[in-house]
Image (cartoon, rainbow, N blue to C red):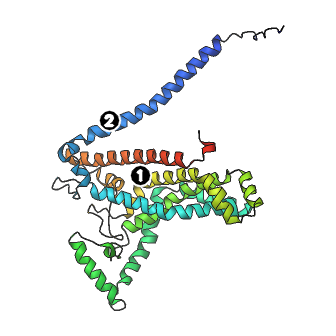
Amino acid sequence: MTQPVKSPPSIPSRLSSRSDRVFEIVILMLASIIALIFVLSIYQLAKESWPALQKFGLSFFTQRTWNPVEGTYGAASMILGTLLTSLAALVISVPLAIASALFVAEYAPKWLANPVGYLIELLAAVPSVVYGLWALFVIAPLLAKWQTTFFNPELYPERFATYTRCAELWANNQTNLQCFFTPSSGAGRGLALAIIILTVMILPYTASVARDVIRLVPADQREAMYALGATKWEVISRAILPYARAGIMGGVILALGRALGETLAVAMVIGDSQEIVKSFWGNASTMASVIANQFGDAQETLHRSSVVTLGLTLFFLSVLVNYVARLIITRLTPKGIQQ
């Protein structure tokens, strides 16, 4: 006859239970503070935005005119400028970031990989104002010189004729696909310069995350592909990138969030024009740049409320981007490592 197994002697756990309970309450309070800050932020922004939303309604987001003198405010041009600068910078930076991450993690020898990786991370630590000054004093003069020589009527009469036709369309607040990409004879500042500087600023975020994720790919996957006779490119394209795609996408979304909210550097170089974007090389504005340039000077209630509404719009746009990012990352994560 089998003997019943005796349970181990009970250990007094009054102190342990009490300390666990206190710790649980403290953690709950700290987590609640984060949620409270989120709710209070929405409340305060919505409260300050109410006068503009009450007067303009949904037309605030579709109207093109932003004129504080006449008391007319429409955010369509700023929303378009924000999306254009962020998405264009993302399209340019992501291939460069992934290529640099693959080089550091897979191709470069250790004596070269560490300094290159450090330099990439160092780009993320440079203040925004430094990027803005670099763009103004280095890149803007080069773009201005190129734009003025691009339409030299003596050397390039056809280009000059194209510019003349496009200038007439721009004067009437119109454009077409050819004129949108036709350089304008500006001072180098504008939408294109903002995209260039944003590309440089967000590149280290995607590159750093992609490099770390690629290094976390199990060695068994690489060795299994090599055992089957795969080449280096086949290992990267069929074993490394599919495994690391969720983490890489996380870095891409992190970079997109930085691009959407970047203020100072963009405000310094984009030209601060509240008109609808008519040229890739012309002046434009983003929601963040308008907030930075006009919030301090907004004396009237409606003007101030409209600027705050831009902040509320940018807030919800960031929340939407993060929510979509979670869905994409969950879908891209291999099933074996999903939580």
Whether residue 198 is visible, yes or no, is no
In this picture, residue 217 sits left or right of residue 322: right
Q: Name the residue under label 1.
A: 261
Q: Which of marks 1 and 2 is nearer the N terminus?
A: 2
In this picture, residue 64 sits left or right of residue 87: left
The type of residue carrying mark 1 is: Gly
- State whether residue 93 is above or below residue 3: below
The type of residue carrying mark 2 is: Tyr
Residue at left offset 21%, top offset 51%:
59
Quadrant where the image shows the C terminus: top right
Whether residue 308 is visible, yes or no, is yes
Q: Is mark 1 on a helix, strand or loop?
A: helix
Label 2 neighbour load within 10 Å: few <14, some 14-19, many 20+: few
Quadrant where the image shows the N terminus: top right
Residue at left offset 32%, top offset 67%:
283
In this picture, residue 103 sits left or right of residue 160: right
Residue 123 place in picture, x, y as percent = 55, 58
Q: Give residue 280's quadrant in the image.
A: bottom left
- The circle drawn on residue 240 is none
| Residue at the left extreme of this rendering | 70
- The total of numbered circles placed on residues is 2
Residue at left offset 59%, top offset 55%:
210
- The circle drawn on residue 43 is 2
Residue at left offset 45%, top offset 33%:
34
